[in-house]
Image (cartoon, helix red, strand yellow):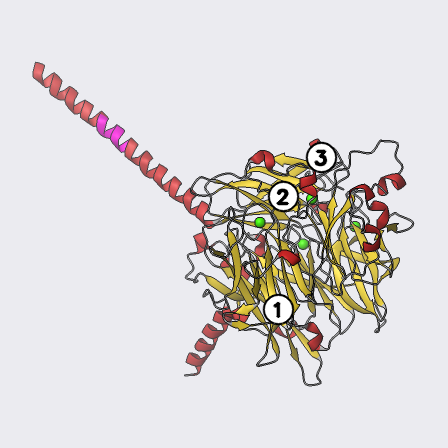
């Protein structure tokens, strides 16, 4: 009997704690695992899962596996979970243990960036104190016991709003936007003084209110971003302020003359204020994000606003001319036309109620609201989010949101799937999509959505091109201290869809054999990708991806751009990388094999020296095709040999018969 119980408990135990390794190499393992989502053990003991809040992602040790930055607010510490692809587990390291001892200055968030432009990823630490925010940099400085060592720098800046990052000066380096009561400033390593953002504004192409606009306060929380919305592969600036959604078009700036001093170069006016999309009549912006929601190659803007106690979801399609044919990918990158500068979205005042662009945020017929983190009464730099990810790789990303459960007064994870709509859609020529709640789409998805999660993000365990999930849930222990639980889920849903992953690095290093290991982590915010895929019906589809910021309240984007391609049986054509350097540079590569991981290095300003490294992830489908092909070749070979021998025998027989005739 005892043995029976032991056997049962072993069976139960092994059934409930899968590891990532259990799912790999399926084609040869012949496992009986079902196609679904699994909770997985990622090498962190259960009693140590109370680590803190997942804050950001980045590859800090340059091994091509994305690592996770955790903020432990209880101890005011930062932890990095290094993913180890050889054992499929996280290795946990505390960094800069006693860097932030003062308890009234709490770590609010982190932004990975290569601050000092040496190819190694550093961390911008956002500290919160009474008057606002303070930023500090933890710089990578050598290696200790196989892992990067971080040093606290002396640099300290205070900012009235949460800082955010991008290549605002067009020189490959990541700079930081901070604000004072009256100014917006750009901080960059090596500059004695922050640059006044006003110096980067071109007055000749801006609307007349631009001077007043730069002194407007950013929303708190704000959702500002450095992202290409004008489809020219040059990241533009979207700033969410008290005035509304500000659209700063990044214009084409021809190469400056060689003798320009750094100072002159840094003050090239390149931003044109084109529009302030005011959220009128008491509408309050709750969250905002960018993604190509309808797979037409242009980046759409999705946001939630609240008015009269009702929250509404806006799917604001990019109305920029559809880049249908290849010459139009990264269109007008080298020059500016009136058209390309125009705000590519429907203005808030024109959204109307008759169109499906605005729908009440709801679960079926029931109106729902995004979870308000202020309810937690903890000092968390978390804001409501719409977190997009294409975990089915079909090209139509769905989204996670944390919704307030009015019955239990607790946060709940909701998954909104991306579905087509045919009626009430204003855009005739385009496919319209809607996000609808899908809290149990089968596949054991309820394992995630039933959680009292406060934070959920996509993550690719084992870098196999299928998006998995990381969840933070919160519970109170006996002495009413919050416990941040971390859970991991593995996406083992079998799909016949393809993906493309692209990571643009900052150009400090060429992606050659010598330097690529250390430089893989130095991601470039604002890189844009455009390309064409052929679907199985044979028609071309333009596709786009952006490498988003990770600032403005830790939206937890993966460092690379992940693009689901759906089903395709062809190469990817005309793959473009565009980065908003001064002379608006782009580079094209073709063809690219689907299921590739691309690392692009825009080494120097000369696009000819830009390099591309390709890492191919063969899917099980490909392996099966290879095995079947080999078997067929063997069988065919066998038949040919058999036929050949038989023919010889027949010949021999015929010859013998022939000779017998003459005997
Ligand atoms: Ca790594
Ligand atoms: Ca660095
Ligand atoms: Ca642009
Ligand atoms: Ca679109």
Q: Position of residue 358 (x, y in %)?
A: 58, 61
- The residues colored magenta run 641-647
Q: Which of the two labelled residues, at mark 2 and mark 1, occupies the earlier sequence position?
A: 1
Q: Which of the two labelled residues, at mark 3 and mark 1, occupies the earlier sequence position?
A: 1
In depth, the one of 263 and 19 nearer the eye is 263
472 shown above or below 478: above
Q: Residue at x 89, y 41 (%)?
A: 263
Q: Which residue is mark 3?
A: 335
Q: CA distance from mark 2 to mark 1?
A: 32 Å
Q: Which residue is mark 2?
A: 529
| Dot 1: element | strand
> Which quadrant holds the N terminus?
bottom left
Q: Which residue is mark 1?
A: 311
Q: Are marks 3 and 1 in contact (CB under 8 Å)?
A: no
In depth, the one of 109 and 267 nearer the eye is 267
Q: Position of residue 85 (x, y in %)?
A: 60, 55
Disc 3 vs disc 2: which is toward the camera? 3
In depth, the one of 557 and 60 nearer the eye is 557
């Amino acid at each position: 009997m005892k043995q029976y119980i032991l056997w049962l408990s072993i069976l139960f135990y092994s059934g409930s704690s899968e590891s990532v390794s259990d799912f790999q190499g399926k084609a040869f393992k012949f496992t009986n695992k079902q196609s679904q989502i699994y909770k997985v053990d990622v090498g962190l003991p259960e009693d140590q899962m109370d680590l803190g809040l997942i804050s950001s992602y980045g590859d800090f040790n340059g091994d091509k596996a994305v690592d996770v930055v955790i903020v432990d607010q209880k101890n005011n510490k930062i932890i990095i979970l290094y993913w180890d692809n050889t054992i499929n587990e996280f290795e946990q390291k505390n960094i800069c243990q006693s860097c932030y001892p003062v308890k009234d200055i709490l770590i609010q968030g982190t932004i990975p960036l290569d601050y000092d432009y040496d190819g190694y990823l550093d961390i911008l630490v956002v500290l919160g104190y009474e008057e606002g925010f303070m930023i500090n940099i933890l710089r990578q400085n050598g290696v200790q016991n196989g892992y990067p060592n971080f040093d606290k720098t002396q640099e300290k800046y205070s900012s009235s709003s949460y800082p955010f990052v991008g290549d605002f000066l067009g020189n490959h380096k990541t700079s930081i936007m901070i604000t004072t009561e009256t100014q917006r400033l750009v901080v960059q390593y090596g500059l004695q003084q922050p640059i006044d953002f006003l110096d980067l504004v071109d007055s000749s192409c801006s609307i007349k209110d631009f001077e007043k606009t730069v002194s407007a306060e950013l929303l708190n929380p704000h959702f500002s971003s450095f992202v290409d919305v004008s489809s020219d592969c040059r990241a533009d600036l979207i700033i969410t302020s008290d005035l509304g959604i500000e659209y700063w078009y990044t214009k084409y700036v021809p190469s400056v003359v060689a003798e320009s001093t750094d100072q002159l170069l840094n003050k090239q006016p390149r931003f044109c204020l084109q529009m302030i999309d005011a959220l009128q009549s008491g509408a309050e912006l709750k969250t905002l994000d960018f993604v190509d929601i309808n797979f037409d190659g242009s980046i759409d803007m999705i946001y939630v606003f609240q008015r009269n106690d009702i929250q509404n979801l806006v799917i604001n399609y990019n109305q920029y001319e559809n880049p249908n044919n290849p010459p139009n990918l990264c269109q007008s990158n080298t020059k500016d036309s009136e058209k390309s500068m125009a705000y590519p979205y429907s203005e808030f005042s024109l959204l109307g109620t008759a169109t499906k662009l605005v729908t009440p945020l709801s679960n079926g017929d029931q109106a729902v609201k995004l979870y308000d983190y202020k309810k937690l009464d903890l000092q968390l730099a978390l804001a409501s989010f719409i977190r997009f990810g294409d975990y089915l790789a079909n090209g139509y990303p769905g989204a996670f949101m944390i919704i307030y459960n009015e019955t239990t007064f607790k946060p709940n994870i909701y998954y909104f799937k991306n579905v087509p709509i045919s009626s009430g859609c204003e855009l005739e020529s385009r496919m319209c999509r809607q996000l609808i709640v899908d809290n149990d789409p089968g596949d054991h998805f309820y394992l995630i959505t039933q959680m009292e999660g406060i934070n959920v993000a996509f993550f690719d365990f084992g870098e196999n091109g299928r998006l998995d999930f990381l969840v933070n849930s919160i519970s109170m222990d006996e002495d009413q201290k919050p416990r941040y639980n971390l859970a991991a889920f593995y996406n083992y849903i079998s799909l016949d869809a393809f993906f493309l992953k692209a990571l643009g690095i900052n150009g400090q290093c060429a992606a050659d054999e010598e330097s690529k290991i250390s430089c893989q982590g130095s991601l470039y915010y604002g890189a844009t990708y455009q390309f064409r895929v052929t679907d199985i019906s044979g028609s071309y589809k333009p596709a786009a991806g952006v490498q988003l910021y990770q600032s403005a309240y830790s939206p937890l984007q993966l460092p690379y751009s992940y693009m689901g391609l759906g089903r395709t049986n062809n190469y990817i054509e005309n793959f473009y990388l565009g980065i908003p350097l001064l002379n608006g540079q782009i580079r094209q590569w073709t063809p690219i094999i689907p299921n590739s991981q691309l690392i692009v290095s825009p080494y120097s300003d000369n696009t000819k020296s830009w390099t591309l490294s390709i890492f191919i992830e063969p899917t099980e489908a490909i392996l099966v095709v290879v095995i079947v092909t080999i078997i067929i070749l063997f069988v065919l070979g066998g038949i040919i040999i058999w036929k050949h021998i038989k023919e010889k025998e027949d010949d021999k027989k015929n010859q013998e018969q022939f000779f017998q005739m003459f005997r």
